[in-house]
């Protein structure tokens, strides 16, 4: 029994490192969200659509990269839990599963935003020609 407890403790301790990496990436994503909100306000004030779309595209691409880091870290942590025989019913296992689901959803949302910027750029280009 002591061996099972040691395995669970070791894997949960290792997951703490993954969680720290996930939290760091999430903080960077929050900063990017604040940058996107500021960019939106600046666009409403200036009306410079070309600069706005270019900047928004760059920020969204950077945000996607951070979201991919969150997803990869959560998947790695879940794999570590599986490798160490942690029960799928455990709190740590369930947290990582939720982290993965949320990260995938956030990544899809950002991809959709990026596609929306591209579509708006195409429509603007059509209007010019």
Image: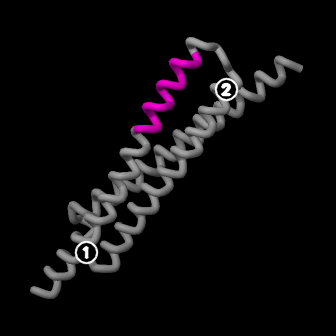
Q: x, y percentage for residue 85?
A: 27, 79
Query: Residue drawn at (10%, 86%), measured in percent from left and top?
Result: 2
**Lower sequence index among marks 1 and 2:** 1
Q: Which mark is residue 51?
A: 2
Stretch of the chain drawn in magenta: 31-43
Residue 1 seen by the camera: no
Q: Which residue is mark 1?
A: 11
**Magenta-drawn stretch contains 37:** yes
Q: Position of residue 74 (x, y in %)?
A: 38, 61
- 125 sits to left or right of 81: right
The spot of residue 95 in percent (x, y) is 28, 57
Classed neighbour count for the residue bearing mark 1: other residues with Cα under 10 Å, few (<14), some (14–19), many (≥20): many
Q: Residue at x 59, y 44 (%)?
A: 61
SS under mark 2: helix
Query: Based on the displayed image, in which of its 4 quarters is residue 33 positioned?
Result: top left
Circle 2 packing at 10 Å, graded few (<14), some (14-19), many (20+), is few
Q: Residue furthest left?
A: 2
The quarter of the picture where residue 60 lies is top right
């Amino acid at each position: 029994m002591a061996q099972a407890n040691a395995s669970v403790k070791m894997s949960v301790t290792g997951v703490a490192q993954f969680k720290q990496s996930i939290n760091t990436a999430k903080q960077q994503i929050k900063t990017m969200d604040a940058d996107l909100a500021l960019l939106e306000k600046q666009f409403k004030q200036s009306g410079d659509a070309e600069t706005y779309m270019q900047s928004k595209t760059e920020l969204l691409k950077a945000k996607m990269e951070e979201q991919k880091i969150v997803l990869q870290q959560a998947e790695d942590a879940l794999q570590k839990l599986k490798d160490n025989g942690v029960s799928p019913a455990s709190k740590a296992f369930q947290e990582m599963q939720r982290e993965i689901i949320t990260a995938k959803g956030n990544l899809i949302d950002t991809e959709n935003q990026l596609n929306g910027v591209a579509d708006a750029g195409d429509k603007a280009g059509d209007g010019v020609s």
